[in-house]
Amino acid sequence: MKEKLYTIPVNEAFDNAGECGFCALHKKLEREILDYVMGPSYMEEDIREDMDRMGFCQDHYRQMFAAGNRLGVALMLKSHMNHTLKETERLFQKEIALTEQKKKPFAKAPDSPFGAFEKGREESCYACFRMQRRMDSYFSTFFHLWKTEPEFRDKVLGGKGFCLSHLKEAMDEGKKRLNYKDYQAFLAAILPLQQENLKRVESDLDWFIQKFDYRFKEEPWKDSKDAVERGIQKMASLLLDKKD
Ligand SMILES: [Zn+2]
Ligand SMILES: [Zn+2]
């Protein structure tokens, strides 16, 4: 298989993709980006500006805090707060000025300058933004390999399908990147594979549940030991760290 540098991560992720190769790519990318945010990003002026403006979502704050690098989080947070304070300084004055202009600014909820700013801030996350951009390029690479490398196609078709959310993204991207006939062939190959593998995880869960019945206590676990983790991944794209 001819390897170009940019195809390597996607190709490798589908070597041992588990329940979804895109989840594996997403998890690796997330770790890289959060490590970068809490570390060397501090040296990059333009990146810091983006981070200061966007901040982070709850999930990414939670992950950064859990990673234990409190100094890294403190540096990033102080910088984001410093930026935000300049904005609130200006916007709070505007809010007060509005109440002076109109007798009842709250009666018919006029556009709140701070409200608009805060909504934008809550909806933006530097890590999500960076990841979305990179995931887009991974989907594009996926279809490039799908079209040009039969070995890659065989690898995907020999795998376990995707999580439902990444399947949806793959279908959206496929519509853009494949012609009508190729998209039809893609769906005809992928959707039965997907259905078969959803059923497989469901039956693993079924056996997992049965194992809690004393009558099956001595029976082997078969493939069900991590059925809950794999079920969560299939349904919610969350790739949990394996226990034991
Ligand atoms: Zn996935
Ligand atoms: Zn985020």
Image (cartoon, rainbow, N blue to C red):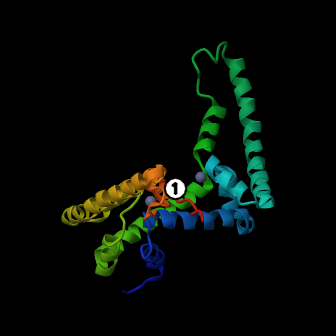
Query: In which quarter of the view is residue 97 placed?
Result: top right
Indicate the position of residue 166 as horizontal and vertical percent values.
Answer: 41, 58
Quadrant placement of the N terminus: bottom left
Residue nearest the viewer, comparing 88 with 148 = 148
Question: Going by the image, does 17 lie left or right of 175?
Answer: right
The residue furthest bottom is: 2
Q: Say what secondary structure mark 1 lies in.
A: loop
Question: Going by the image, does 142 lie left or right of 186?
Answer: right
Residue 40 in view: yes
Above or below residue 92? Residue 206 is below
Indicate the position of residue 24 as horizontal and vertical percent values.
Answer: 50, 66
Amino acid found under the numbered disc labelled 1: Leu
Please give the residue where the numbered disc 1 appears in the rendered image. Answer: 238
Q: Quadrant of ligand 1?
A: bottom left
Residue nearest the viewer, comparing 103 with 80 = 80
Residue nearest the viewer, comparing 166 with 137 = 166
Residue occupying the point 46% across, 73% down: 13
Residue 172 in view: no
Ligand 1 lies under 8 Å from the Cβ of mark 1: no
Above or below residue 85? Residue 217 is below
Residue occupying the point 38% across, 70% down: 142
Indicate the position of residue 153 as horizontal and vertical percent values.
Answer: 31, 74
Indicate the position of residue 124 as horizontal and vertical percent values.
Answer: 59, 48
